[in-house]
């Protein structure tokens, strides 16, 4: 009876969360998106901002007007808000950045609090006449346990300002807290967060090879019910364009980077494989052809999303009171990846120590990627053909815990697939490299409370498509005269949560960009460009009536149009406050089967 009553209370909480907030939505006018000015050269993205709960808010500044002109870190301090209590329905990170007109590289930016990463992204490149500004938002409600106490933090944004690189980057950031109320209940946040960073102040860790590791050892609570790790793995240096790399034996012939084209983050607990995270092919605003990303950058370029790995089947191993080492590695890393993560745990409030077992783990020892080389160099030195790399991992992890609500079993089944096909044509007049890459995840998580309890199922599908074509045309003397480039890039996520055969929640996210440009050269230097054009389309919907649609169109480096509400009822964007329309990880009552 205790298990049944507990489940009923949680179903009631779920019903409250799903029904009441639908009357308090954020709506945008149809047709023209607000805040966008056609003809503007400033940053324009289709991504949604974080929906906000009803009621008042409290703002806590983290820093104001920091200037980033070197590679020193910028510390700040945080104290919890006053007058907002300690029960919050949502906490949102807001940050604003700018760079002065001039010449400057794109730079990696990250924000840290209590050693934990709360933001990771890159910056927009300026031009001689355009000083871009941009705004980012992140739902950081999962850090509520950390935010309950004073913390030290730092902003990391390395930059060079000298006679050549003149762009000065500046930024400000704040946290916005929304007190829980009857219409917006307290967030179902993890009870603790354990950062995987470079030290107590926080910072990414550099992994130069596939055997380098980010390892942290924790003594964790002994009553963990659920555990997740959010992973960031950003390719830099020789790995910035990792999706264009080929095996070492072909690197010289194909005039490309070595190390192959397969990258994947692996998660291990005490040396035992526990999960994998596909690496998203982020393209920075200076990547391939900088003009392609003005004024609309690539998917997530300014605001990366982490990939969340469910470690709940391993909770019984973590609950023994002994130290445990969590390790991240990047398969194929080739100088280098910047890596970090956050381990989130939910605890059983009715029992101090939980027992159980990991019952299944078929991930250990699975094979990595296979590469097929079909390139040919003829007698005249003309190179042509294809290099194809593929990897598929199908695995199953399962475990159980004896909790204060009864025995909880968790079963995670996943197929993680990767393909990268590259076509080359190289001769005296041209160099062409065409890339067709796709990473996908199909995941099913089943959770059951007690031998006869209702079972919940969460099905998730992720797809990360990338198509890119780089080309160089040469004159009779072998000098580059033009370079046409084209990129399409996407992020899709489909999530369905069921109670038995009943669908409780379903959501879909689709973020795609299509962009192209042609560089002109003279004497080995870029002299101009033509044909810049891009479109970004962002869609979010769910079975509760949520609908978000925005289309951004640009030409010749300026915004042509920004259109909202296409396909939505009455042409209006409608987002309940508790949704995650950006596709970020969510362990709230709507999307996580373990929340029962």
Image: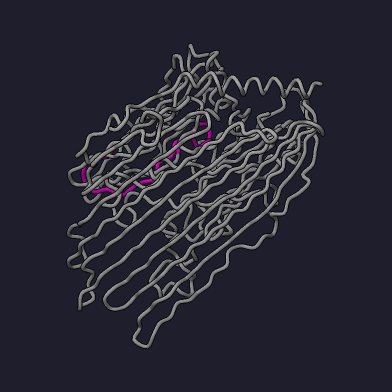
Tell me where the magenta segment starts and ends, as one range. Answer: 98-119
* 463 up-or-down from 435: above or below: above
Quadrant in which the C terminus appears: top right
* 56 up-or-down from 269: above or below: above
**Image coloring type:** one colour
As for residue 102 lying within the magenta part, the answer is yes
* 467 up-or-down from 5: above or below: below
Q: Is residue 28 left or right of residue 262?
A: left
Give residue 145's quadrant in the image.
top right
Q: Residue at x 39, y 85 (%)?
A: 378
As for residue 18 lying within the magenta part, the answer is no
Quadrant in which the N terminus appears: top right
Of residues 342 and 474, the one nearer the viewer is 474
| Furthest residue in direction bottom, as rendered | 379
Residue 115: x and y, percent? 53, 35
Residue 347: x and y, percent? 69, 29
- Asked if residue 71 can be seen in this view, the reply is no
Give residue 471's quadrant in the image.
bottom left
């Amino acid at each position: 009876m205790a298990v049944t009553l507990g489940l009923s209370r949680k179903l009631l909480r779920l019903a409250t969360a799903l029904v009441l907030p639908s009357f308090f939505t954020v709506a945008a006018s149809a047709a023209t998106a607000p805040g966008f000015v056609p003809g503007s050269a400033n940053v324009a993205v289709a991504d949604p901002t974080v929906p906000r709960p009803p009621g008042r808010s409290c703002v806590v500044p983290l820093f104001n007007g920091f200037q980033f002109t070197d590679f020193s870190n910028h510390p700040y301090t945080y104290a919890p808000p006053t007058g907002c209590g300690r029960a919050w329905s949502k906490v949102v990170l807001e940050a604003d950045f700018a760079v002065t007109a001039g010449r400057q590289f794109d730079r990696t930016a990250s924000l840290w609090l209590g050693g934990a990463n709360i933001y990771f992204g890159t910056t927009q490149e300026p031009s001689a006449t355009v000083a871009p500004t941009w705004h980012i938002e992140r739902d950081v409600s999962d850090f509520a346990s950390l935010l309950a106490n004073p913390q030290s933090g730092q902003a990391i944004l390395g930059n060079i300002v000298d006679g050549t690189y003149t762009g000065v980057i500046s930024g400000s950031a704040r946290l916005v807290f929304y007190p829980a109320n009857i219409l917006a209940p307290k967030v179902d946040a993890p009870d603790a967060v354990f950062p995987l960073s470079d030290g107590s102040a926080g910072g990414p860790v550099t992994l130069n090879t596939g055997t380098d590791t980010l390892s942290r050892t924790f003594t964790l609570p002994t009553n963990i019910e659920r555990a997740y790790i959010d992973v960031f793995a950003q390719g830099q240096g020789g790995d910035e364009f990792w999706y264009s790399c080929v095996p070492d034996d072909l690197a010289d012939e194909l005039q490309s980077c070595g190390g192959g084209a397969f990258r994947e983050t692996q998660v291990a607990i005490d040396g035992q494989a526990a999960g994998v995270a596909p690496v998203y092919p982020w393209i920075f605003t200076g990547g391939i052809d900088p003009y392609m990303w003005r004024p609309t950058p690539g998917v997530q370029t300014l605001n990366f999303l982490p990939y969340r790995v469910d470690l709940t089947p391993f909770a019984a191993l973590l609950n023994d009171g002994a130290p445990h080492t969590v390790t991240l590695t990047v398969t194929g890393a080739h100088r280098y990846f910047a890596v970090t993560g956050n381990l989130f745990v939910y605890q059983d409030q009715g029992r101090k120590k939980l027992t159980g077992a990991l019952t299944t783990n078929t991930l250990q020892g699975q094979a990595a990627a296979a590469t097929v080389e079909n390139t040919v160099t003829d007698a005249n030195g003309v190179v042509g053909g294809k290099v194809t790399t593929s990897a598929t991992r199908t695995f199953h992890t399962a475990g159980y815990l004896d909790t204060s609500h009864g025995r909880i079993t968790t079963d995670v089944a996943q197929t993680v697939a990767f393909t990268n096909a590259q076509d080359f044509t190289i001769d005296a007049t041209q160099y062409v490299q065409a890339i067709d890459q796709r990473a996908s995840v199909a995941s099913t998580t089943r959770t059951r409370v007690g031998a006869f309890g209702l079972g919940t199922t969460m099905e998730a599908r992720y797809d990360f498509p990338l198509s890119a074509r780089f080309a160089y045309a040469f004159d009779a003397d072998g000098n580059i005269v033009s370079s046409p480039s084209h990129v399409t890039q996407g992020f899709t996520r489909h999530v369905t949560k069921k109670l038995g055969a009943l669908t409780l929640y379903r959501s879909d996210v689709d973020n795609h960009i299509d962009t192209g440009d042609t560089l002109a050269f003279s004497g080995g230097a870029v002299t101009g460009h033509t044909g810049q054009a891009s479109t970004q389309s962002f869609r979010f919907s769910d079975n509760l009536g949520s609908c978000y649609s925005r289309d951004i169109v640009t030409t010749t480096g300026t915004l042509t149009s920004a259109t909202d509400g296409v396909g939505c009822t009455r042409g209006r964007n409608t987002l309940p406050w508790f949704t995650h329309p950006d596709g970020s990880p969510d362990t709230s009552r709507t999307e996580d089967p373990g929340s029962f």
